[in-house]
Amino acid sequence: MRLSEKHWTLLILIVLVALTPFFFPSSYYFRVGSLIFINGIAVTGIVILTGYAGQISLGHAGFAGIGAYTCALAPVHLGIHPALAVVLGAAISGALAWLVGRPILRLKGYYLAVASLGLGILVSMLLTNEAWLTRGPDGIDVPDPGLRDLFRAMGLGFSATEAWYVFNGFMLIVGAWLALNLYDSPTGRALRALHGSEIAARTVGVDVAGAKLTALVISAVYASVSGSLLALQNKFITPDVSGYMHSIEIVTMAVLGGAGSVLGAIFGAGILTMLPQVLTVFAEYEQILLGLVMMLVMIFMREGLLPSVLRLVRGRGE
Amino acid sequence: MKLIHKFALGAMTAMAFAATPVLAEIRLGATVSETGPAAFLGDPEAKTLKLLVEKINAAGGLNGEKIELFLYDDGGDPNKARTFATRLVEDDEVQAIIGGTTTGTTMSIIPVAEEAKIPFISLAGAIEIVKPVKEWVFKTPHTDRMACEKIFTDMKKQGYTKIGLISGTDGFGASMRKQCLDVVASYGIEIVGDESYGPQDADMTPQLTNLKGKPGIQAIMNPGFGQGPSIVTRNYAQLGITLPFYQSHGVASNGFIDLAGKKAAEGVRLPGTALLVESILADSDPQKPVVAAYVADYKAKYNIAPTTFGGYAHDALAIYADAVKRAGSTEPKAVRDAIEATKGLIGTTGIVTMSKDDHLGLDLSAFRMLEIRDGGWKLAE
C-alpha cells in the first residue's frame, strides 16, 4: 500500500517526536524540542492561511499574545482552570480574527497584511500599556496547569520539561493532522482554488470571502494555542510574545521551510528555533547568516527548503 | 554514551556546539542581552564579565581554581533567556548564573535557577526580583524605588512640593513611575501632572507644554530609559522651560549628554553611581580604589570607559568571587549562604551588605546626586 502525503507527514512527525528523545544527552534538549513544537503549531496555522489560501498575515503574534495572556489572566480573575483558558484564548482569538477579517477579506490584495499588522501592534500595545491588568512590559506569572502531576497520576515520572515535550509534541501532531485533513476537505479545496485564482474560484461557486475568513480564523486559533502553550510551559510571559518581530518570525519559519507543506513549515520552525542555539559561538553573525539563508532560499528555492529539496531528490530518482 | 551523544548531534541537526570543553573547576554561567533592544546594557555587561574572569584567572583563580565562563546572548528575549538558562543548568552544568539584563529576562530565568538550586545574581532593576526574597536569587543594581527616594529626598531639601511627571511606557519607565507614585506622599510632595510617552515617540513637546501649564508646578521629573529621555531633555530646552529638571538613573551615562546635547542637558539632575564620576571622587572615598581599578582595566582592554551597567556585572562577579572565597568551595548551597552573608563588599554601585531579608544589600547612600555642568558630571551634594 502506498502511503499518501498526509500519512507520510504524520508518520514522520510521530517518529521524530517519539524517537529523538532517546538521543537527548540532557533535559535542555527537551526544552528546545518543546519550543520547536510550539512554534510548529503557530506555523501550521500559517500554512493554512498562506500556503492553502494564499493570504498573508503580519500580525499573528497578536493572537499568540491573546492566547498567552488569557492563560495568565483568566485563571486568576475568572477562576477557571488554565487548560480551559487555552480554549477561551482560542475562542477570543478566533472571534477577533472573524471580526477583523469579515470586512477586510471582501477586498482583494494586500489589505489583510496591513490590517493584521495593525491588529498585532494594537494587541502588543494593549498588553504593554494596560499595566493594571497585564502588569506591563516586565511580564506576568502564569499559573501552573498541573501537567506534570497529570503525567504522574498516569504513572509516568516525567520532569516538567519532559512532560511539556511530550504534551506539545502531541499537540503539534494533532494540529498537523487537522491541517492535513482540511487540505482534502471541501473547504481546503475551496482555499486552494481561490489561491490559484479568485475569479476562477468565484466562477465555480466558491464563497471566496467566506473561505478566506475560515482560513484566517483557523490560523488565529493555531497561533493562540501556541501562545498559550508557551505561557503555560514558561509559567511566565512578557508582551514580547505579541511583538511585531514574533509575527515576522512565524511567517519567516513557514516561508523558509515551505509554506505550502505542513511538514516543510514545521521543518522551518525547527531550523529557526535551533539556529540561535547552534550559533551561540558567533552570536554577532546570527542575523547576517539568517538573512543570507533567507535570500538564498527565496532566490533558489521559492517553494521553501523542504519541498524544493524533496523535488530535487525525486527528480534525481526518476 | 559518547557515540550516542555524537549521533544525537547529527540527528538533531547539531543542536548544540559539538566541542566538549575541558571541565574547569568553577563553571560560571551567564546570559545577557548583548544584542537587541537592551544591547546598550548587555554589551558592557558581557565585556565586563569576560574582562574580569580573565583577570581572576590570570591571578590564579579563586581558591586556586580557574573560572570557566559560559556566556550566551539572549537578545533581550525572555523566552530565549529561559532556554539559555536551561542550557546553562542542564548542559553546561554551571554552579551559578549571572545575568538577566532586563527585568523580563530575569523573571524568566528565576524559575530555572530556583528549581536547579543554584545561585542566580541578576543585573536588572525591578524590585520584584528580590521582593519577596527568593532563596537563590540576588541582584546588584539599585531598585527604581531607591532612585525615586533619592530624587524626592533632593527635591524635599530644595523645598519643591508640587512636581510633574513625564514617564516612558517602556518597562523601565512604567515600573519606575509606579514606584515613585507609591513613595511620593511620604516626602510631602504632590504630583500635579502625570504625562507619558511611547518608547518610539520622537516629540514630547505637547506633554511638556501640558506640565508647564500646571499651576504651582516647581520641578519636573522624567523616569525613562533609552532615547526617550534625551528627546524630552531637548524639547525641555526648546520650550525654554526653566523649572528644575530631574532625570532617572536609567540615563546615567555619557551617551545621554551626547544625545540630548550639552546645552539642553545643562543643569539636569539625576541619581547616579560612583562609577560615573570616578575622576572627581575624593581620594578618601571608600569606593574610589575599586571603581578606579575597574575603569582602568576596562579602558585598557576596550578603549572606552565602562558604563553603570557594566558596573552591575562587575559587582555581580565580585559578590560571587567573594562568596566562593569565603565558602571555600563552589558547592551551590555553600556559595548561596556565603552570598547572603556578604558584608561591606565594596562594589561600583555601592557598598553591599546582604541579609536573610535583603538580597540586594544597597541603601540610598549608594546613589550620588549628580548634576550635569558643561557637558560633564558634578556631585550635587
Image: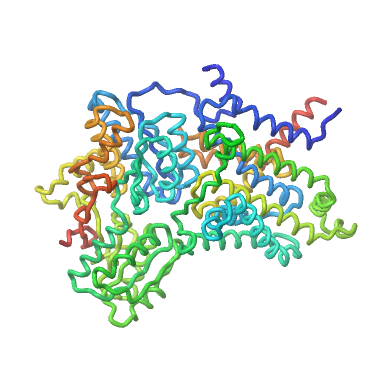
Q: Quadrant of residue B8?
A: top right
- Residue visible at 68% across and 54% down? A56
- Residue situated in front as seen by the camera: A188 or B126: B126
- Residue situated in front as seen by the camera: A144 or B378: A144
Image height of B224 relative to B105, above or below: below
Q: Position of residue A12 (x, y in %)?
A: 71, 31
Q: Position of residue B180 (x, y in %)?
A: 32, 64
Quadrant where the N terminus of chain A lies? Answer: top right
- Residue visible at 40% across and 51% down? B103
Left or right position of A52 against B100 = right
Left or right position of B39 against A108 = left
Left or right position of B372 against A184 = left
Q: Position of residue B375 (x, y in %)?
A: 24, 60
Would you say residue B11 is visible in this rendering? Answer: yes
Left or right position of A287 against B310 = right
Q: Quadrant of residue B32?
A: top left
Would you say residue A296 is visible in this rendering? Answer: no
- Residue situated in front as seen by the camera: B267 or A7: A7
Q: Position of residue A297 (x, y in %)?
A: 65, 39
Quadrant where the C terminus of chain A lies? Answer: top right
Label total for image: 0
